[in-house]
Amino acid sequence: MNTHTSDRPPTRIALVGGGAAAVCLLDRLARTPAPGGGSITVFEPSGNLWRGRAYQHDTDAVLANIIPAEMSARAGDPDDFLRWLRESELPYGQGDYAADGHFPPRRVFGGYLERTAENAIATLSLGGRPVDLVRDAVVAAREAGDEVVLTTSDGRRHTFDYVVCAVGAGRPADHYELGGIPGYFGDPYPLRDTVAAVPRTADVTVLGTGLAAVDAVVSLAAHGHRGRITMASRNGALPAVRQRPVFPEVRRFTPAALHAAAARTADGRIALGDVLDLLAAELAAHGADPSLVLAELFSLAGEAPIDRLRRQYADIDAADPGMRIMQHAVPESGPDAWTLMRSEDQEFIRENHYRAVMSLCCPMPPANARKLLALHEEGRLRVLSGLWNVKPLARDGFHVAADGGEYESDVVVNAVSAPSHRVPAQARPFVDSLVEDGIGEYHPHGGLHVEPSTSRAVGAGRAHRRMHAIGDMGAGTLFFTSGMPSVLERADDIVRALVEDLTTGPDATDHPDATDHAAVPTPFQEQPA
């Protein structure tokens, strides 16, 4: 094992992407001593520095879907965002949970991210670790001995000791090849621009029924749109409605319990049935009926979208706490459960329950559910499943075909999920180069293969200690990657891995076994905030 001392060369770290994940990483690094000091370079060519696509400047109708108490960008300090709201004299996160104004607009959270980044940069600079910003895209990467060389779009080369791929999510796929046709909006964001360009009496079809589609509908309504709106997708699966939160002490469905269960098996993996048993035990311990949670999971296929929405909105304060326990426990322990499960069980969930799990894990705020229901009651909104074709008419407008019938629409707003490969088009040359160099490899279900406990990129049968990936780039391996709690946890893992590597050297980390899912304790100590 190598011994690293304080006279080691300065450590050069690159963050490829300057959105919310980069902010979490900067804040974590700012509170972490670095042997030998060093520098950090952030590559971000877009105009949404620190905000990313999710938290860019947009209309106030685009709400965060996570409660403010769970949106901190600072590991170990869950109240940081709430404290910033109070200090900024902003009213969000107060009053009745279900009332309008409790969930902040996403642009407000973007302001918090900017503040957090600025403070982290100041702390790092004062501590002798300057942060440089490069506004050019990274187009290539290659390993050169113990370094990684990045090439930017202007042809310059930059050399680093560690690189984190934090390029964010991709744009919606144009499944029906409508790009460039008048009346078609290929990307709904920023919605302030999209809704301003849609005639207020137009018949609008929103492709997709997920959170982005909900954003589009409520933004159109807030802008004064008066025409009919149709949400259409293959499955018609609306996000669940987030119930009033509870914060139970989770004792049975914990990462430690899941790892212990896996350790007792011959292959170090845990069966789906064992995961469900632990979850059922947790639910029962809090007085919840596990069968009700299972019924909710299966309701997606057998219940009309608006009926399900209406029932879930009425159940915000349901007597049974099962769904609220789930919404608290699954984000915390779900990533460990997923990476410990056997591949056949993972595939079963992907094929049969992916949409239901995503619906329950990424619920909409009650205020948005209320707005959708009001639009439906007014006869201005419908939700269709079985979407199978959209094509332009010879004249203006579009022909839409779904299980509910065929109809014509003046405007189509594309709010479907990002492409399954989850690599933004502008980042494709960079990510392709990682794969070509053997630093990483594409995961068949999205992004890159990563080592679960460290988020190191996996390529050629090993985890590469100098390359990490965060956010949707790890979706194939980790499944749970969206939302600030997940991003924050991955940022914490990455910084811990960097410190471990700097402290113990490559003998302990550059190993051929990239399948060890157990967390590795590290000699890690934070600086006080």
Image: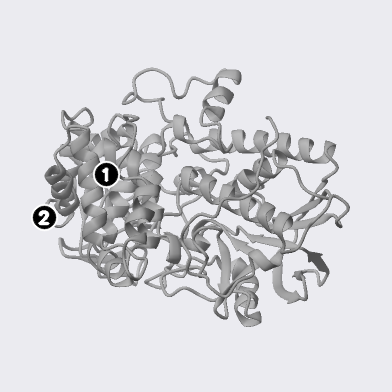
Depth check: 275 or 191 in front?
Answer: 275
User: Given the image, on which type of amino acid does mark 2 rest?
Assistant: Gly
Where residue 122 sits: x, y (%)? Answer: 78, 36
Indicate the quadrant where residue 274 lies.
bottom left
Q: In this view of the protein, which residue sits in the foreground, 7 or 153?
A: 7
- Relative depth, front residue between 240 and 481: 481
Is 290 displayed left or right of 343 in the figure? left
Identify residue for label 1: 240
Say which of 301 and 466 sits in front.
466
Residue carrying label 2: 302
Tell me if residue 12 comes above or below residue 323 in the rendering: below
Q: 486 left or right of 364?
A: right
Amino acid carrying mark 1 in the image: Ala
Residue at image x 43%, y 19%? 94
Earlier residue among tags 1 and 2: 1
Marks 1,2: beta carbons within 8 A: no
Q: Quadrant of residue 75?
A: top right
| Residue 209 in view here | no
Can you give x and y, in whole percent of width and height, for residue 17 in the image?
Answer: 65, 56
- Image coordinates of residue 65 in percent, x first then y, are 40, 39
| As drawn, 378 above or below 352 | above
Residue at 42% from the left image edge and 30% from the top image edge = 103
Residue at image position (30%, 37%) is 242
Does 105 appear above or below 440? above
State the image coordinates of residue 294 (x, y, percent, origin top left).
16, 49
Residue at x 25%, y 49% (from the top left corner): 278
Q: Is residue 492 visible?
A: yes
Q: Is residue 491 above or below residue 430?
A: above
Quarter occupied by the C terminus: top right
Element carrying mark 2: helix
The quadrant of the image that shows the N terminus is bottom right
Mark 1–mark 2 distance (CA, rounded to whole Å): 15 Å
